């Protein structure tokens, strides 16, 4: 068996080298539970762990969103890679010789277009960087950067560049390199002119910041104007490769540091990230001038358990920080806020106070999200007046009431009591009333859909009876689970049953198993699932493999499963015949009713022989 251009022995070596618990643990905090490990799913928001990893079978399965597979599949999903890309990455990490061609044998039109867009952007990034450092045109931009404290090290590391003021200088350069400008227009790098017979550069007379996806591929640009003009920053428009709502600036460079520390620092802009990186904060990312989104928060949760929000110290920056906390907390991140003094931004603070102070007094002194919410809330009230003070306390208690930990609630109530000279008893009484009201509201629910494990609904759901699957369906699942662990059973089932599984997905999984063992492979759920290359089948296979298939299994049980599976078509046919005979009798068709009765007797005899 060979997957595209990838030899199956390379896939086997990759799966053998990479222990799945170790792979997943780089992104997900796992806790041992019996023979398996469990954690919060990195692919959807949840509060109750439904993400399960089996070290015995070397597979994972989320019982919430259904994502499942082996170590290769996990890396594909978490990093956004294709199957060959994930195998290549894991092989290189293990120093396993790759031994297949870099380019896929077949490339779809969409894949080719994306590849060409990336090639054009990579070439443009080098060209912009060259102009900044080596041309007369780039001197004003370089002087500006020097004045802002940007060093050669920063410029080279982040490949900062300069787009000249001419209308079509980049277009000419790309043309000279045989780059298709029509495709570059789709990638947002150039624009069609008003006559529709040519192209113009989208970015002119701007300092250029390449924007890379999580895999380090240049997919967009942000251009900062040199003079007083609008817009101050111009970003690439939304394209097939660039979505501001999901891409985080510098994630490609920062993710290694974030994984190691399980901590990320979230900034608002490019300059903040670059200056912080130079100061020693290698785990910084930015939202590129747009508000934090749920997708941003989910991406961060894949890499980090803790996120420190380090936005500008002005009103707009602090308001944005306040809004970001709910999204981060809903994603499962522990959120903190780094507070900058005097309305400074991170770039400015580092320039004035230096790297060491920034790390020790800003980043490492970040306050918990509840503390920041209370500080932020004070801005909206005149605390010198009793009316403002009472309104603030009422709103502060609402924030404290949302805390799950009694110790945390006690801590903040004591702070309120100390700061405003109210008794702890009176504050606790009011807090108790607020919590009772919150509990009543939660009983109504706030997200009926998928309430079982949705972060927007923290109430205890009513117990519902589990869905009972038909006997033949259960038999097929249990039989496939045993077949995945025993090649002899799979061979026996092939002889006795073949492809006569009643569920289409089960029949497909059996066919793949027969082929897998026919190639001389040993039982290995992880490696078997690598042969499927179908997301739906992988989910079903993982769900089946996660069941305990070994208890009480013997030859008689296997035969019972096979008999139950064979019985179903006859039972279904029998039910249809019974419906037919009832219709014939109601219509007064005695002859037809007698014929059907004979057919029913024949079917019942067949069932007894199974």
Image: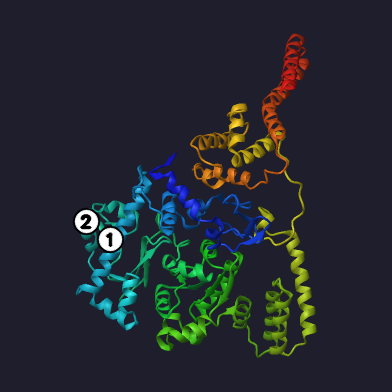
**Residue drawn where x is 27% and y is 54% of the image:** 181
Mark 1 surroundings: few (<14), some (14-19) or many (≥20) residues within 10 A? some
- Which quarter of the picture shows residue 143? bottom left
- Residue 579: x, y in percent? 74, 22
Q: Which of 365 and 220 is in front in this view?
A: 365
Q: Which of 47 and 319 is in front in this view?
A: 47
- Residue 544: x, y in percent? 63, 43
Report if residue 164 is visible in the image.
no
Q: Nearer the viewer, residue 461 or 39?
A: 39
Depicted 67 relative to depicted 208: above or below: above
- Residue 139: x, y in percent? 23, 77
Depicted 523 relative to depicted 399: above or below: above
Nearest to N terminus: mark 2 or mark 1: 1
Report if residue 235 is visible in the image.
yes
Mark 2 surroundings: few (<14), some (14-19) or many (≥20) residues within 10 A? few
* The C terminus lies in quadrant: top right
- Which quarter of the picture shows residue 417? bottom right
Q: Mark 1 points at which residue?
A: 123
**Residue drawn where x is 30% and y is 77% of the image:** 152
Q: How far apart are marks 2 and 1 (CA)?
A: 9 Å
Depicted 568 relative to depicted 588: above or below: below
* The N terminus lies in quadrant: top left
Q: Is mark 2 on a helix, strand or loop?
A: loop
Depicted 9 relative to depicted 401: above or below: above
Q: Residue 574 carries which label?
A: none
Q: Mark 2 points at which residue?
A: 177
Q: What element carries label 1?
A: helix
Is there CB contact under 8 Å for labels 2 and 1?
Answer: yes
């Amino acid at each position: 068996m060979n997957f595209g251009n990838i030899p199956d022995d390379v896939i086997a070596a990759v799966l053998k080298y990479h222990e799945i618990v170790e792979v997943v643990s780089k992104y997900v905090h796992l806790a041992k539970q019996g023979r398996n490990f469990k954690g919060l799913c990195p692919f959807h928001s949840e509060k109750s762990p439904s993400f399960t990893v089996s070290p015995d079978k070397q597979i994972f399965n989320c019982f919430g969103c259904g994502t499942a597979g082996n170590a290769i599949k996990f890396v594909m999903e978490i990093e956004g890679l294709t199957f060959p890309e994930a195998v290549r990455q894991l092989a290189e990490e293990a120093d396993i010789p790759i031994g297949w061609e870099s380019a896929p044998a077949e490339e779809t039109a969409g894949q080719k277009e994306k590849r060409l867009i990336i090639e054009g952007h990579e070439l443009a990034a080098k060209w912009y960087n060259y102009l900044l450092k080596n041309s007369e045109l780039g001197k004003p931009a370089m002087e500006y950067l020097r004045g802002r404290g940007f060093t050669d090290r920063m410029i080279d590391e982040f490949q900062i560049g300069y787009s000249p003021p001419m209308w079509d200088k980049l277009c000419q350069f790309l043309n000279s390199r045989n780059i298709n400008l029509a495709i570059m227009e789709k990638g947002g790098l150039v624009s069609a002119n008003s006559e529709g017979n040519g192209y113009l550069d989208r970015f002119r007379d701007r300092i250029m910041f390449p924007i890379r996806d999580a895999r380090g591929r240049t997919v967009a640009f942000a251009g900062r104007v040199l003079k007083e003009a609008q817009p101050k920053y111009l970003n690439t428009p939304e394209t097939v490769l660039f979505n501001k709502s999901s891409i985080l600036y510098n994630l490609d460079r920062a993710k290694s540091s974030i994984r190691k520390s399980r901590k990320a620092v979230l900034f608002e802009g490019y300059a903040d990230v670059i200056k912080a990186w130079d100061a020693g904060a290698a785990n910084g990312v930015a939202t590129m001038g747009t508000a934090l989104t749920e997708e941003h928060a989910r991406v961060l949760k894949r890499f980090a358990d803790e996120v420190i929000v380090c936005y500008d110290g002005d009103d707009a920056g602090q308001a944005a920080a306040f809004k970001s906390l709910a999204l981060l907390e809903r994603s499962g991140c522990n959120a903190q806020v780094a507070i900058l003094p005097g309305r400074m931004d991170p770039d400015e603070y580092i320039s004035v106070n230096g790297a060491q102070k920034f790390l020790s007094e800003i980043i490492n002194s970040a306050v918990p999200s509840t503390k920041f919410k209370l500080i932020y809330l004070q801005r909206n009230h005149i605390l010198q007046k009793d009316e403002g003070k009472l309104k603030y306390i009422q709103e502060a208690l609402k924030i404290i009431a949302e805390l799950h930990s009694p110790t945390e609630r006690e801590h903040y109530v004591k702070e309120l009591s100390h700061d405003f000279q109210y008794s702890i008893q009176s504050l606790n009484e009011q807090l108790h009333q607020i919590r009772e009201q919150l509990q009543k509201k939660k009983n109504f629910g706030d997200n009926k859909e998928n309430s079982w494990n949705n972060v927007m609904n923290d109430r205890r759901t009513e117990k519902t009876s589990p869905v009972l699957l038909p006997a033949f369906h259960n038999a097929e699942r249990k039989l496939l689970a045993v077949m995945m662990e025993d090649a002899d059973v799979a061979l026996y089932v092939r002889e006795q049953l073949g492809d006569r599984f009643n569920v289409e997905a089960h029949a497909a999984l059996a066919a793949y198993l027969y082929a897998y063992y026919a190639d001389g492979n040993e039982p290995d759920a992880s490696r078997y699932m690598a042969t499927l290359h179908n997301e739906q089948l992988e989910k079903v296979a993982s769900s089946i493999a996660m069941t305990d298939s070994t208890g009480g299994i013997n030859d008689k049980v296997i035969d019972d499963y096979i008999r139950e599976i064979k019985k179903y078509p006859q039972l279904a046919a029998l039910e249809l015949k019974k419906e037919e005979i009832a219709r014939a009798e109601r219509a007064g068709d005695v002859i037809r009713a007698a014929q059907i009765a004979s057919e029913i007797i024949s079917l019942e005899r067949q069932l007894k022989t199974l």
